[in-house]
Image: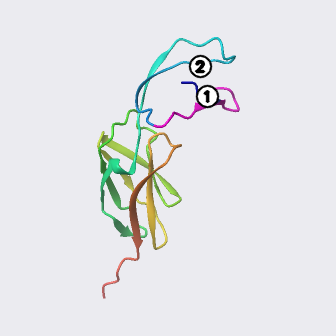
Amino acid sequence: TIVPAVSSADGTQINCTTLPGAAGFVDLSITQNGVDYTDKVTYEFYSITPQNFLVLFPRAGPLNTSTPVLLQGNFKIIGTELARCKFGELVVQATMDNTANMRCLAPAHVPAVTVLYTTFNNQNYHNTNRTYTFYVSPNLS
């Protein structure tokens, strides 16, 4: 199957969109003229869906305390140095302690219920269908 590709402005990257259902091992080659192709290289593509994310803990935290957040799932991820969590519009670094656990620190935020998004390449964010609530800590007196 042939899909269109776009070269980056500096010419060092080529970006293309995989077809739906393209998860798995795929032979990839490129052409600049539609005739002469590079040698094939096998890549493993993965598909991330909201169903991959099973548990978010905790689901809420105080506004300014950098609460550790755990997101458990059933996904296989390779090369996680670019993993991120996005709480609404705020992006934070994430870590993977194995292929099923993503951890990040909730950022400082105003009181709100935010949708949690994740990425494994710092580009394509996936809606986890989970929300995280930022709340004002109660004052004990």
Specify which label sits upstream in the sequence, 2 or 1.
Answer: 1
Q: Quadrant of residue 105?
A: bottom left
Q: Is 41 one of the magenta-colored residues?
A: no
Secondary structure predominantly adopted by residues drawn in magenta: loop
Give the colour scheme shown: rainbow
Residue pointed to by mark 1: 14
Percent across and percent down for residue 139 are 35, 83
Looking at the figure, which quarter contains the C terminus? bottom left
Q: Is 18 one of the magenta-colored residues?
A: yes
Q: Which residue shows up at 33% across the image and 41% down it? A: 75
Asked if 87 appears above or below 61 in the picture, the reply is: above
Residue 65 visible here: no
Asked if 33 appears above or below 110 in the picture, the reply is: above
> How many angstroms separate mark 2 from mark 1 (CA)?
9 Å
Q: In the rendered structure, which amino acid carries the disc numbered 1? A: Ile
Looking at the figure, which quarter contains the N terminus? top right
Percent across and percent down for residue 126 are 46, 49
Q: Badges 2 and 1: C-beta atoms under 8 Å apart?
A: yes
Q: In the rendered structure, which amino acid carries the disc numbered 2? A: Ile
Q: Which residue shows up at 34% across the image and 57% down it? A: 69
Q: Quadrant of residue 76?
A: top left
Q: Nearer the viewer, residue 126 or 104?
A: 126
User: Closer to the camera: disc 2 or disc 1?
Assistant: 2
Percent across and percent down for residue 94 are 40, 47
Please give the label number shown on residue 117: none
SS state under label 2: loop
SS state under label 1: strand
Please report the bounds of the magenta region as a residue range.
6-20
Q: Nearer the viewer, residue 123 or 126?
A: 126
Residue pointed to by mark 2: 30
Q: Nearer the viewer, residue 68 or 122?
A: 122
